[in-house]
């Protein structure tokens, strides 16, 4: 290849100029996507479809709502992956909910949530089980080892006993802890 050709005009623009434009468009596109992903991950965004559901109030009333430590855990902290590629994939899966939102009769009513809570909770739990509750472990880093002195003896014992098991026999956080942010349906 003759590198000087890069700097010569092509038909109208030099190939270099075209490359520069290409890179600029790519970078702008990348950040625009980041912005969109960011905007689509706020609690407000989640609640724009779930606006008549008690989900946010439930979080606020739970240990994850800023009680003792003053931390309010966001929907995405628990429900969306941190790894960017998995994040994109999960986003695409979630985008089916746009279809659901438009087609499910009475979706955005508290009655719908109450009636379908069990089934919806099962869907949500599938994600946590498939990822070994990675979202929980992202914050709760001292459950199995190097536990704080303040952890209750019973909790420490249960956690240690679970951790001693072989990896495939181990329970994941949500197997033992249900309803940490919402009202887990009984029955
Ligand atoms: C476009 C509307 C819309 C938006 C925005 C939305 N949801 Fe949903 N969500 C739905 C619908 C519809 C369902 C029920 C899907 C079904 O049963 O087919 C649902 C179900 C769920 C479920 C239970 C089922 C599952 O797949 O796990 C969870 C958890 C959930 N949403 C969390 C969230 C979070 C977190 C956000 C913000 C990042 C969010 N939703 C934003 C419409 C939406
Ligand atoms: C963004 C960080 C964050 C994420 C994600 C998170 N937690 Fe927490 N969790 C906290 C904080 C902060 C507290 C309150 C700390 C305290 O009181 O010592 C807490 C408290 C708890 C408690 C104690 C509840 C109580 O009644 O005292 C349990 C159990 C728990 N979390 C389990 C989970 C599980 C299971 C998940 C995943 C589904 C999860 N957490 C996700 C930060 C997080
Ligand atoms: C085998 C069941 C089991 C598993 C698995 C498990 N826990 Fe626990 N956990 C318990 C029990 C039992 C307690 C004590 C219950 C209580 O005090 O209400 C507890 C207590 C806790 C507490 C409160 C500790 C304290 O005393 O301050 C937190 C936070 C917690 N678990 C988070 C987690 C997280 C995050 C995971 C996953 C990494 C996890 N647990 C896995 C059974 C389990
Ligand atoms: C601390 C982690 C955590 C936070 C924060 C959280 N969720 Fe959840 N969510 C869960 C878990 C775990 C489940 C599975 C069912 C259960 O254990 O209650 C669930 C279940 C759900 C479901 C299925 C219906 C149900 O009640 O089980 C929906 C919908 C949902 N979450 C939406 C949201 C929205 C919207 C927000 C933000 C306002 C949010 N969640 C915040 C952990 C969380």
Image (cartoon, rainbow, N blue to C red):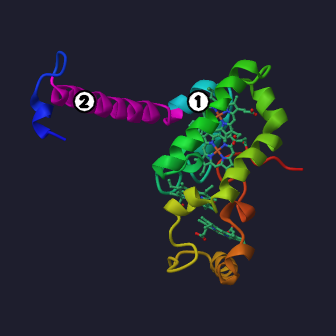
Front tag of 2 and 1: 2
Q: What whole-number distance in Å separates the C-alpha atoms at marks 2 and 1?
A: 34 Å
From what the image shows, is residue 52 above or below residue 57?
A: above
- In percent of the image, x 58 and y 29: which residue is there? 47
- In percent of the image, x 65 and y 75: which residue is there? 155
Choose top left, top right, bottom left or bottom right for residue 25.
top left
From what the image shows, is residue 40 above or below residue 133?
A: above
Q: Which mark is residue 180?
A: none
Q: Is residue 64 left or right of residue 170?
A: left
Mark 2–mark 1 CB contact (< 8 Å): no
Q: Is residue 85 left or right of residue 158?
A: left
Viewer-nearest residue: 91 or 60: 91
Viewer can see residue 124: yes
Q: Is residue 175 left or right of residue 135?
A: right
Asked if the residue at label 1 sits under 8 Å from ligand 4, the reply is yes
Majority SS type along the magenta span = helix
Q: Measuring from the top left, give residue 91's x and y in whole percent.
A: 56, 38
Viewer-nearest residue: 64 or 17: 17
Residue 29 is one of the magenta-drawn residues? yes
Residue 117 is one of the magenta-drawn residues? no
- In percent of the image, x 52 and y 45: which residue is there? 87
Circle 2 Cα neighbour tier, 10 Å, few/some/many (<14 / 14–19 / ≥20):
few
Q: Measuring from the top left, give residue 118's x and y in whole percent.
A: 82, 43
Q: Measuring from the top left, give residue 124's x and y in whole percent.
A: 70, 46
Q: Check the picture and name the quadrant holding the N terminus.
A: top left
Q: Which mark is residue 24?
A: 2
Judging by the rendered image, the residue that carries numbered circle 1 is: 47
Choose top left, top right, bottom left or bottom right for residue 172.
bottom right
Chain part drawn in magenta: 14-43
């Amino acid at each position: 290849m003759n590198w000087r050709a890069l700097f010569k005009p092509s038909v109208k623009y030099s190939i270099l100029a075209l490359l520069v434009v290409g890179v600029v468009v790519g970078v702008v596109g990348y950040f625009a996507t980041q912005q969109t992903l960011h905007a689509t991950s706020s609690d407000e965004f989640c609640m724009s479809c779930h606006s008549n559901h008690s989900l946010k109030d439930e979080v606020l009333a739970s240990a994850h709502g800023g009680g003792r430590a003053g931390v309010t855990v966001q929907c995405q902290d628990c429900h969306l992956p941190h790894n960017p590629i998995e994040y994109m994939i999960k986003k695409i899966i979630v985008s089916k909910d746009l279809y659901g939102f438009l087609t499910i009769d009475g979706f955005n009513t508290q009655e719908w949530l109450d009636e379908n809570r069990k089934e919806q909770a099962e869907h949500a739990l599938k994600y946590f089980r498939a990822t070994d509750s990675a979202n929980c472990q992202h914050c709760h880093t001292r459950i199995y080892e190097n536990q704080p002195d303040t952890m209750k003896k019973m909790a420490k014992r249960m956690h240690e006993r679970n951790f001693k098991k072989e990896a495939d026999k181990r329970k994941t956080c949500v197997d033992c802890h249900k309803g940490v942010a919402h009202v887990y349906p009984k029955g």
